[in-house]
Image (spheres, rainbow, N blue to C red):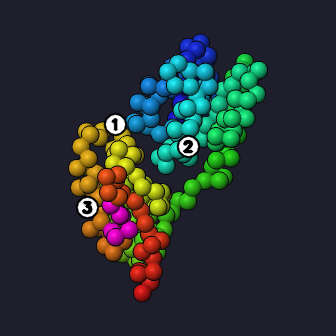
Amino acid sequence: MIYCVEDDSSIRDLEVYTLNNTGFEAHGFADSTSFWDALKTEKPELIILDIMLPEEDGCEILKKLKASPLTEDIPVIMATAKSMEIDKVQSLDMGADDYLVKPFGMMEMVSRVKAVLRRCKKQGREEILKAGGLKLDLIKRTAQIGDESIILTFKEFELLRLFMSNPEIALTREQISDGVWGSDFIGESRTVDVHVRTLRQKIGEYGACIETVRNIGYRWAFKRKERNFAE
């Protein structure tokens, strides 16, 4: 899925049409509000983000994307005005993966999308997450401690993946609920707490790695527990 955030409906419709007809699936958004709402439901493979937007401009959106552990890995291509070189420099400095200079051709857009996706796929994230004897296989969706399999529900697996992918980062309950439940989350922080408690029990001694951060949420702190596991 590719998200196109562009307030000009003619450009947005053309972007979405072209992507949908060149082997991709794409959705368009006219403003930041509709974009953020969609992001809670589905995480895209890539975002094409216009800088000049109503409400919240593209640079502010990019800054928020890169500041969150839940969205920092989504590749972003910024669309900038031809005369605004400072926008290109600022976007790249803030973490954008590439940029398109308006007016741009649709085939150029498709070419840059393919190039960024190839580059990001090569860099890739690990398919197996490990913490000592705890192993999480993201492809097979299995969890093990040593040679023993752990039976996790879908949400428990996603919760453990979120923690292990973001070591030493204090995640708020809202970030956790958005990352694991998305739009299905009904808004009660107790749902997160109950799942964390169950997950701690299922992963045995590694449950101690899920630290409670007072007034915030939780943090995966394996490194500080590693010495005790080795003893």
Residue count near mark 3 (Cα–Cα under 10 Å), binned few <14, some 14–19, many ≥20: few
In the shown orientation, is residue 98 left or right of residue 165? Answer: right
Give the residue displayed 41% in from the left and 30% down from the top: 37
Camera-side mark, 2 or 1: 2
Mark earlier in primary sequence (1, 3): 1
Residue 133 circle label = none
In the shown orientation, is residue 5 left or right of residue 214? Answer: right
- Please provide percent x and percent y for residue 127: 53, 59
Q: Amino acid at mark 3?
A: Arg
Magenta stretch, residue numbers: 207-212
- 38 vs 103: above or below: below
- Whether the magenta-drawn stretch holds residue 174 is answered as no
Residue 183 circle label = 1
Q: Amino acid at mark 1?
A: Ser
Q: State which quadrant residue 208 falls in.
A: bottom left
* Numbered disc 2: secondary structure: helix
In the shown orientation, is residue 182 left or right of residue 5? Answer: left
- 160 vs 28: above or below: below
